[in-house]
Amino acid sequence: MSEPISRWTAVETIGRGVRAAPALRTGFALTLWLALVGAGGRVVIPVLVQQAIDRGFTESGVKVGIITVMAIVAVVLVSVATWAQRTAVLRLGRRSEEALYSLRVRLFEHIHRLSIADHSEERKGALVARVTSDVETLAQFFQWGGLAWLLDGTLMLLVASVMLAYDWVLAVVAFVVAAPLGIVLQKVQSHLVRAYDLSRSRNANVMTQISEVVAGAETIRAYDAGEHFADRVKVASRERSDSFIRAGTIGAFLFPSGEVFSVFTVSAVVGVGVLRGPGSGLTAGALIGFVFLTYRFLEPIAEFTEVLEQTQTAVAGMRRVLGVLEIPIGPPEPELPLPLPAGALGVSIDRVDFSYRTRGDTDEPPVLVGVSAHIAAGQQVAVVGETGSGKTTLGRLIARLADPTAGTVSIGGVSLTRVANADLRARVTVVPQEPFLFEGSIAANLSFARPKLSLAELESSIDALDLRDWLDTLPDGIETEVGQRGGQLSAGERQLVALIRASLVDPAVLLLDEATSSVDALTEVRLARALEKLAKGRTTIAIAHRLSTAARADRVLVLDHGRLVEDGTHVALVDAGGVYARMYESWVASTSSAGAAAEGA
Ligand SMILES: Nc1ncnc2c1ncn2[C@@H]1O[C@H](COP(=O)(O)OP(=O)(O)OP(=O)(O)O)[C@@H](O)[C@H]1O
Ligand SMILES: [Mg+2]
């Protein structure tokens, strides 16, 4: 599967983003109106100044009444506008938080459901990490860039329309002179951003160099290499200060340039206005009001250039986030599910091929080739084979964590593609090679499989598997804490817990993928005992790394490079002298030599 990076344009991405997070759209029209009213508050003053000059300062004297009324109007309008702006900001903040929340939930659910045929756990982990940082970028955008778009955008729009309404010639003059400002500021801004990125990474480099010198002091002294490492630190420090000076220089240029451009623009407006004279219909008040408006129009430009950078980053983040949501998820739920018969269920594997699609849809080496086996209801089967022969993969297909590339797997005579997911989870239980335990007690790790059971019932399920002696060795019995990922228990004990957990579900088909890591002798006996109890009355498929498990099974399936090469009882296969016989021989040799070594120690 290729990287989920799409080639959608910015507009397309934003459109899809809004569709993926509908909270962004809810009530947006009202938010926009409120922002416009808020922007109105900032246009009121220039307009009132114009009115006050043209109507209040007449040749017949100052009209105090008119000016007082205008002052009151200004106070009221500005108050309303401030309230509207505050409400718009709050609404945008709330909606964007809701949108990000639902996006996060959807992303993690989606990643969780991705087919294991396409995505290993590590890759899912990497996806989660990347998506987390992308969503963080979006959150930052909404906290600042989104706000700027809303407030500055509406302000510029409104100011521009009022300018055009006052005097379109002057408005055009202002826009034409101001346009280069935007372009230059944008260029300088992106230089500045890059310069600061470089400075930050060089700063980190200096820190790394210094901490290495400190940590490696002994080695450095042993080789009398002090000078060599001092030079390294000096070079890194020099590079660091150079880049900071450069960033500072760009910043220093950026700082006054907005001011310079405002002066140019306003001078042009005033110049053209004066040249055209009163004959053009332009009053003194309108010209002064216009100057105010021009300043208002220029104010947000500098901020906008920064926002543009941030917007590009946010759109790229959104594109990746949407790309993840586009990755197809695991095996689909059947449209017309068939019910499974009650009681023990047989398992049929019929000419199954399988390839993982992790690196692309084609040309993947097949992991399973033409595997066929019919396992009767209630049979105890062991699957053995070298590491990488495809045992775990076969188990995954039986639990329908992925669908075969060719062929079918059915349980109880029903193809897995026709079994409802909930049915499947209730009837087929997997005890994985590395079972996952959550931080908490053993009881807590058991009870989430059947939340209604009491502690006493949980304990009796442990008794039922003949594991009381194990429970008694634990410091706090069933309340013993397992630690993060079950780290306080041994790998074998984690499998014991997983077996007990599986027994609570009472599945018709039990799939046990034995731990690869070595298990101490006592735990091995306990695992075997528990499995024997658990196997009664159900179909059991044990992927066996310890061939003692295979020796106890009714039937052994031998996988070799993805092919089923032998199928029979333990005794028959040992007699046949094939792959299994050789595996068994070397297993017996290794365990007896390990035993001898342990005795010798
Ligand atoms: N999620 C995955 N994505 C891609 N390739 C995988 C994935 N899981 C396993 N493989 C590959 O498929 C092949 C069979 O792996 P599988 O885990 O089924 O072997 P196994 O018989 O269970 O081995 P082991 O005895 O080590 O547990 C291996 O080549 C492995 O690298
Ligand atoms: Mg395996």
Image: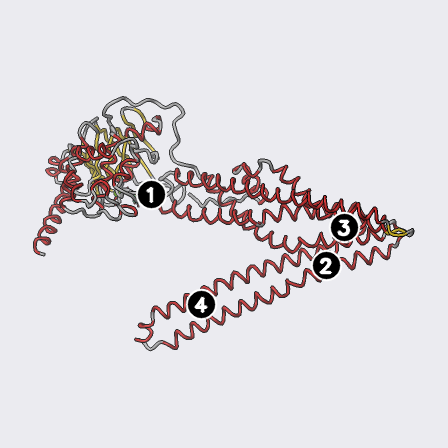
Residue under pointer 1: 365
**Between marks 4 and 1, how big is the CA–CA gap?**
46 Å
Residue under pointer 3: 46
Q: Tell me which amino acid carries mark 1.
A: Pro
- Which one is earlier in the sequence, the residue at label 4 or at label 1? 4
Q: Tell me which amino acid carries mark 4.
A: Val
**Between marks 2 and 4, how big is the CA–CA gap?**
41 Å
Q: Are marks 2 and 1 in contact (CB under 8 Å)?
A: no
Q: Quadrant of residue 562?
A: top left
Residue under pointer 4: 206
Which of pointers 3 and 4 indicates the residue nearer the eye?
Answer: 3
Q: Tell me which amino acid carries mark 3.
A: Pro
Please tell me whether mark 2 sits on a helix, a strand or a loop.
Answer: helix
Can residue 167 be seen here? The reply is no
- Quarter of the image with the C terminus is bottom left
Q: Is residue 25 left or right of residue 342?
A: right
Mark 1: give few (<14), some (14-19) or many (20+) Cα within 10 Å: few
Q: Observer-nearest residue: 428 or 506?
A: 506
Q: Which mark is residue 262?
A: 2
Mark 3: give few (<14), some (14-19) or many (20+) Cα within 10 Å: many
Which of pointers 3 and 1 indicates the residue nearer the eye?
Answer: 3
Q: Tell me which amino acid carries mark 2.
A: Ser
